Amino acid sequence: MSALHLIRHGPIAEIRLDNPAKLNAFTSEMLSALEQHCAEVEKDPAINAVVISAEDSKAFCAGADILAWSELEPFEFARHWVREGHRIFDRVARLAKPTVAAIGAHAFGGGLEFAATADIRVMAPQATLALPEASVGIVPGWSGTQRLIRLLGEPIVKEIALFGRRISAERAFAAGFAAEISDDPRAKAFELAEGLAGKSPRAVEVAKYMIHAAVGEDTNAMIEALGAGMISPTADRTEGVAAFREKRKPEFPGN
């Protein structure tokens, strides 16, 4: 059984890390489960928001399980562990549903990169952020030097990735990475997710696409998704499909 669960709370889905023996460090099984959960969430129209949380009080996520990747050959490490993890984290970041991460404890390495995939984040006062990869001879591989630049800024990412410093919840809030600091970040995350009630799910989804296109988060796909949404309800599309089915030349009305 994977140590990463999908729990439904009515219209809110919770993706919950549950590997406390390893401080919620990611294994390959957890990555596979995460991808599967993303697919389930995306296809379920009853889900309006996603909360990302963790079971352990000591760490939100300590990153990637060293034992899961340290024995891999260099090519396998780069191709499967890094690229697959990066692709799956991108899948989380690009969910159509809005996401809130509840960071109740330290988020290091891949854990920080995972938190960065959320749309907004709530941190506990004692939680800290770090990219300690250089201390074990590797570099961030799941967008720590890419997505985090937009969220924390180049100076802070250099501070944590090059000099090994930890960033407090207060600094993360000041930088805009954390939306709030709360003694109960999971409860606050659910409160924020529940605040979507009464709002148009489609309007929220399209707004997320537009914002992502503006900041370069899968820009090509976002632009084409928006274009498809504009063309789909047109009479031209209806006529084009009907003509194809009837094997005749279409007569587009232009609306």
Image (cartoon, rainbow, N blue to C red):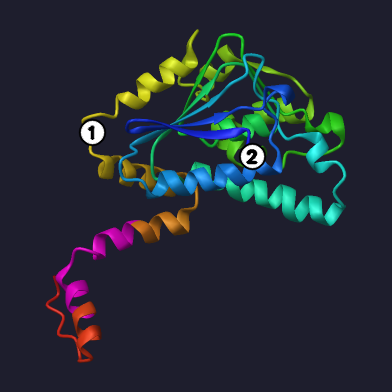
Q: Which residues are magenta?
A: 226-240
Dividing the image into 4 quarters, which one contains the N terminus?
top right
Is 244 on the left or on the right of 212, as rendered?
A: left
Is residue 231 visible in the rendered structure shown here? yes
Which of the two marks, 2 or 1, is nearer to us in this view? 2
- Residue 97 image position (x, y, % from top left): 38, 40
Q: What amino acid is labelled 1 in the image? A: Lys
The relative height of residue 119 versus residue 207 in the rendered view (above or below) is above
Which class describes the residues within 10 Å of circle 2: few (<14), some (14-19), or many (20+)? many
Q: Does label 2 or label 1 sit earlier along the sequence?
A: 2
The residue closer to the viewer here, 112 or 56, is 56
Residue at coordinates 70% horizontally, 26% vertically from top-left? 62
Q: Main secondary structure of the magenta part?
A: helix
- Residue 191 image position (x, y, % from top left): 36, 19
- Residue 170 image position (x, y, % from top left): 56, 12
Label 1 sits on residue: 199
The relative height of residue 241 versus residue 57 in the rendered view (above or below) is below
Q: Count every numbered label the image shows and give the total.
A: 2
Label 2 sits on residue: 30
Query: Which structural element holds mark 1?
Result: loop
The relative height of residue 84 versus residue 184 in the rendered view (above or below) is below
Judge whether residue 125 is colored magenta.
no
Dividing the image into 4 quarters, which one contains the C terminus?
bottom left
Q: What amino acid is labelled 2 in the image? A: Met
Which class describes the residues within 10 Å of circle 1: few (<14), some (14-19), or many (20+)? few
